[in-house]
Image (tube, coloured by chain):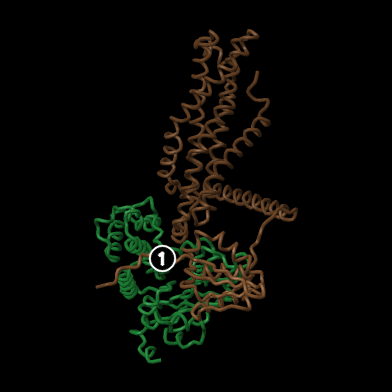
């Protein structure tokens, strides 16, 4: 019959101290000095060891230790200040632990504090990284343009299925969220301006404000921000996972162009879907605005719709739609660029997805500002 | 086995990751119809060497020529042709997760844009049969496959275009002993049927002993030995010592090389 396993608790690690005749300390260590036994009392034990460890006259008797492991040995070694005390007795089988420690290298822990030099280094590294991203992005854009022209001559090779799948995913499936957000923003905007307009008695100008504001500015930016959060992150994650699972490598060795198969369909699909989403968001925003105006201002739906074509020249709509096209291509390019740069680990995948959303929303707002300056004379009476 | 025509030529290859030197002057020639195993410890750069042969990674210096075409600087049309002449089996299979088993194997064939669909279907089913995947698994997605099956589907995809050159990255890693033996004998059979040149990266000595005509040992940033297994084992180098003459090495090679057991 097998002996039952010994579940009795191992003897606690203990330190027995005595003072010798000449006043020097004598430390006897007994019990189990392994990680499990020490972990619970590590602070107390190491503090007590420290008090004697610095005393060169202290004598150490380790023969009472029943079990020792590396953790226990390191604890003692540290208390002794990284050297073997002169008066030391220990069991021969424990000799090896300290022998290894005496020969182990201890690279200093590097602590990074703030210094101007480090700050300058970090700034330099960041600049190089940004420049690298810009170069990579332009490179990708160039490749997309080149491959598009190449495909123009070979329409049979255009990845129609991927394009249509992406239009569905990024466009059709985003109709719900853009409708809801557009509608609510329309109501809010209408409410806020209605109060101001009532004071000056210029009620009917609600049409101008909402019309220009939503069609020219809010519709495109709102749709772009929502799509960047929804589809931009998804695109980065999809391509990034393909890097992690080596699918990108498999495509490369099969000689399949990732630009043609992955990037181009996404860019084309989003450049097509986003203007349509902008139109849809404009519509829902205006609808919300009209309903709120009717309640708040006695500007009925008919008045609103009759005045709209006069108040808002149609060039505003074209401007809004072309913004949608540019934003769509931009979001998809940023998402693909960052997706292709994901390194094969999960950390990098998460960082890439976050960066994709942050970068594309920032770029959308920057480009929107550029549009505002460049077309400041277009679309007003 | 080999007729002495070089298929892959690696010349004076240097690789660095940041400050870490991986390769410092690697030279290697792979001949037609041979099976060459690249062995080495973890981090010795054997997978990197293979990725450079495939043109996936760029070396800091040196060149890799496959079928006479430089994989890093070659003309894009020549490279496209080259890619139809080799097949690669990645460590985890690297199957396209959005495509079924059938579509994964069919993809390289469809990419040629020359073959009718019914012919592609027959070729795919033949390749699946060759690697021992039953027809009822053809419509499964890669996520539904076991590790061994993923690898065999990966092999079927690599063989889809009837390549002359086959790369295997850790062909038996992650497989249980029975399955890895199965996979090894599968590669052995296919290699004879299809007259393949095989380059294999592995640290599994059983696989090395079972398949290789020649072995290249990567250690200390160099190829410390290249030759047949008995030749390589006699080379005096600490890594070879520990790899082949250790307990595991003796057990794995014992059957192939009886003289080892005596020594």
Depth check: give the residue in front, A228 or B7: A228
Quarter that holds the C terminus of chain A: top right
**What is the secondary structure assignment of the residue under circle 1?**
strand
- Residue shown at 43% from the left, 46% from the top: A159
User: How would you rate the neighbour count of disc 1 (Cα within 10 Å): few for under 14, some for 14-19, many for 20 or more?
Assistant: many
Count all numbered tags in the image, as a single digit: 1
Depth check: give the residue in front, A84 or A51: A51
Q: Residue furthest right?
A: A116
Q: Is residue B38 above or below residue A131?
A: below
Chain whose colour in the figure is green: B
Q: Can you give x and y, in whole percent of width and height, for residue B103 in the image?
A: 34, 54
Which residue is tagged 1?
B87
Residue A198 in sight from this viewpoint? yes
- Residue shown at 43% from the left, 49% from the top: A157
Chain A painted colour? brown
Q: Can you give x and y, in whole percent of width and height, for residue A205 in the image?
A: 61, 13
- Chain of the residue that carries numbered disc 1 in the rendered image: B
Quarter that holds the N terminus of chain A: bottom left
Q: Can you give x and y, in whole percent of width and height, for residue B86 in the image?
A: 42, 67
- Residue shown at 49% from the left, 87% from the top: B235
Q: Is residue B25 above or below residue B108?
A: below
Residue B27 in sight from this viewpoint? no
């Amino acid at each position: 019959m097998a002996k039952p396993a010994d579940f009795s608790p191992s003897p606690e690690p203990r330190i027995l101290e005595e003072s010798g005749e000449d006043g020097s300390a004598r430390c006897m260590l007994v019990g189990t000095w392994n990680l499990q036994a020490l972990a619970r009392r590590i602070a107390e034990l190491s503090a007590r060891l420290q008090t004697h460890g610095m005393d060169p006259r202290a004598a150490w008797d380790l023969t009472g230790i029943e079990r020792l492991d590396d953790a226990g040995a390191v604890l003692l070694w540290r208390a002794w200040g990284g050297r073997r005390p002169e008066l030391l007795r220990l069991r021969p089988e424990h000799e090896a632990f300290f022998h290894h420690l005496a020969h182990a290298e201890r690279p200093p822990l590097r602590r990074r504090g703030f210094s101007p030099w480090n700050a300058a280094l970090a700034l330099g590294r960041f600049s190089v990284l940004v420049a690298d991203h810009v170069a990579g992005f332009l490179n990708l854009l160039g490749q997309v343009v080149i491959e598009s022209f190449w495909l123009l001559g070979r329409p049979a090779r255009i990845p129609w299925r991927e394009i249509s799948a992406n239009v569905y995913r990024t466009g059709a499936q985003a109709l719900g969220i853009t409708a809801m957000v557009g509608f609510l923003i329309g109501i809010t905007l209408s409410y806020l301006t209605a109060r101001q307009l009532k004071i000056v008695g210029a009620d009917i100008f609600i049409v101008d404000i909402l019309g220009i504001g939503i069609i020219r500015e809010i519709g495109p930016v709102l749709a772009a921000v929502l799509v960047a959060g929804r589809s931009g992150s998804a695109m980065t994650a999809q391509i990034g996972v393909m890097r992690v699972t080596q699918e990108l490598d498999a495509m490369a060795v099969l000689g399949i162009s990732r630009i043609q198969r992955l990037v181009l369909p996404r860019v084309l699909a989003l450049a097509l879907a986003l203007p349509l989403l902008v139109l849809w968001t404009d519509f829902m925003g205006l609808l919300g605005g009209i309903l709120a105006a009717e309640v708040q201002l006695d500007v009925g739906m008919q008045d609103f719709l009759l005045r709209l074509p006069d108040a808002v020249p149609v060039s505003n709509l074209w401007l809004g739609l072309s913004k949608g096209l540019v934003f769509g291509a931009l979001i998809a390019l940023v998402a693909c660029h960052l997706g292709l740069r994901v390194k094969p680990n999960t950390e990098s995948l998460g960082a890439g997805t976050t960066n994709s959303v942050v970068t594309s929303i920032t770029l959308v707002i920057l480009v929107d500002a550029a549009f505002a300056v460049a077309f400041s004379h277009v679309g007003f009476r | 086995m080999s007729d002495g025509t070089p298929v892959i030529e690696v010349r004076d290859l240097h690789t660095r990751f940041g400050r870490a030197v991986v390769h410092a002057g690697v030279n290697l020639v792979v001949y037609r119809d041979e099976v060459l195993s690249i062995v080495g410890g973890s981090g010795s750069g054997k997978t990197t060497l293979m990725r450079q042969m495939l043109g996936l990674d760029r070396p800091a210096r040196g060149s890799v020529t496959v079928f006479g075409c430089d994989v890093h600087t070659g003309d894009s049309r020549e490279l496209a042709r080259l890619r139809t002449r080799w097949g690669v089996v990645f460590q985890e299979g690297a199957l396209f997760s959005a495509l079924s088993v059938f579509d994964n194997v069919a993809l390289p064939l469809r990419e040629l844009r020359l073959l009718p669909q019914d012919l592609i279907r027959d070729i795919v089913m033949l390749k699946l049969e060759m690697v021992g995947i039953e027809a009822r698994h053809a419509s499964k997605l890669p996520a539904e496959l076991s590790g061994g099956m993923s690898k065999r589907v990966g092999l079927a995809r690599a063989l889809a275009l009837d390549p002359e050159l086959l790369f295997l990255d850790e062909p038996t890693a992650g497989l249980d002993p029975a399955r890895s033996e199965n996979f090894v004998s599968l590669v052995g059979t296919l290699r004879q049927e299809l007259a393949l040149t095989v380059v294999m990266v592995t640290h599994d000595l059983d696989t090395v002993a079972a398949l290789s005509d020649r072995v290249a040992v990567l250690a200390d940033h160099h190829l410390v030995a290249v030759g047949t297994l008995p030749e390589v084992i006699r080379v005096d180098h600490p890594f070879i010592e520990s790899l082949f003459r250790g307990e595991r090495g003796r057990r794995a090679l014992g059957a192939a090389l009886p003289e080892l057991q005596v020594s």
